[in-house]
Image (cartoon, rainbow, N blue to C red):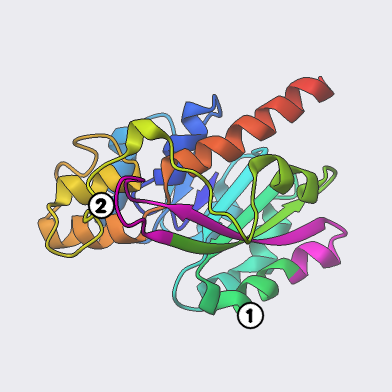
Amino acid sequence: GTLYTGLGGFDLGLAWAGIDIRWQAERSPTLRTLLAARWPQAAQFASAKEAAAQAGPVDLVYGELPADAEWIAAAPIVVAGLRAASWVLVEGRPDNGAQIMAAGRPLLEARWRVTYRVLRYATESAAGRAHVRQRVWMLAARVGRPTAVCDRVGLRRETPLARPRGLSGPPSAEQPAASLAMLASMRGLPAGWTDGLAEDTARRAVAEAASPWVGERLGRVLVSLCARAA
């Protein structure tokens, strides 16, 4: 299940890793329409509180920390409503570090294991100047070992994750003058992923979107761990 889903970039990566997307929570009705078209089997909710109250149990809850303080208000309700989950991942910008720490407190109080990592990954071609996107992760596990998962994903402060060669593109792709298709490609989204959205809406959503290949990387580690446990 995902909160503040946006364009569903991280969801797409999890799906590539073989993880089923059961529900998504997104405030924008326009983006919810796009998500419903991409994941017709997934339930759609308008807020984290609504998801906590109505969503079915899942193994993993992922959320991109929003710009406002909605998560802080919703966190205790979300944690109480999603106790069946095994993993929770909150991602946010480095300048939201205090909010990310606050998001972890309800989980720590519920005796989850919580770890924080800096995620750095290149979104442009290795042939030109790389644009490094930086995020902070809070990964929490009800039973598992989040530190070991982060290590296996390859989260290191010093070295950005290497972008798969198949996703490489022009080194100027992150610049505002680039076409929408080029920007989406550099984020790792498939061609046509933003079809149906107005240009301005699509550009804002792509700029905020999580990269699918990072979601896939985490997803494959979690799937591997579940297979070993089974």
Element class at badge 1 = helix
Res 139 quadrant in image: bottom right
Is residue 41 placed above or below 90 in the rendered structure?
above
- Amino acid under disc 1: Ala
Q: On residue 153, which mark appears? A: none
Depth check: 57 or 227 in front? 227
Q: Position of residue 214 (x, y in %)?
A: 50, 43
Query: For mark 2, what is the residue?
Result: 171
User: Dots 2 and 1: beta carbons under 8 Å?
Assistant: no
The residue positioned 62% from the left and 60% from the top of the image is 158
Res 194 quadrant in image: top left
Magenta stretch in the rendered image? 105-132
Depth check: 143 or 138 in front? 138
The residue positioned 63% from the left and 80% from the top of the image is 98
Depth check: 90 or 75 in front? 90
Query: For mark 1, what is the residue?
Result: 98
Q: Position of residue 184 (x, y in %)?
A: 25, 47
Quarter of the image with the N terminus is top right
Is residue 124 placed above or below 152 in the rendered structure?
below
The residue positioned farthest toward the front in the image shown: 127
Res 27 quadrant in image: bottom left
- Amino acid under disc 2: Pro
As for residue 95 lying within the magenta part, the answer is no
Residue 24 located left or right of residue 115: left
> In this rendering, does residue 86 appear at all?
no
Badge 2: few (under 14), some or many (20 or more) residues near its Cα, within 10 Å?
some
Quarter of the image with the C terminus is top right
Residue 123 located left or right of residue 178: right
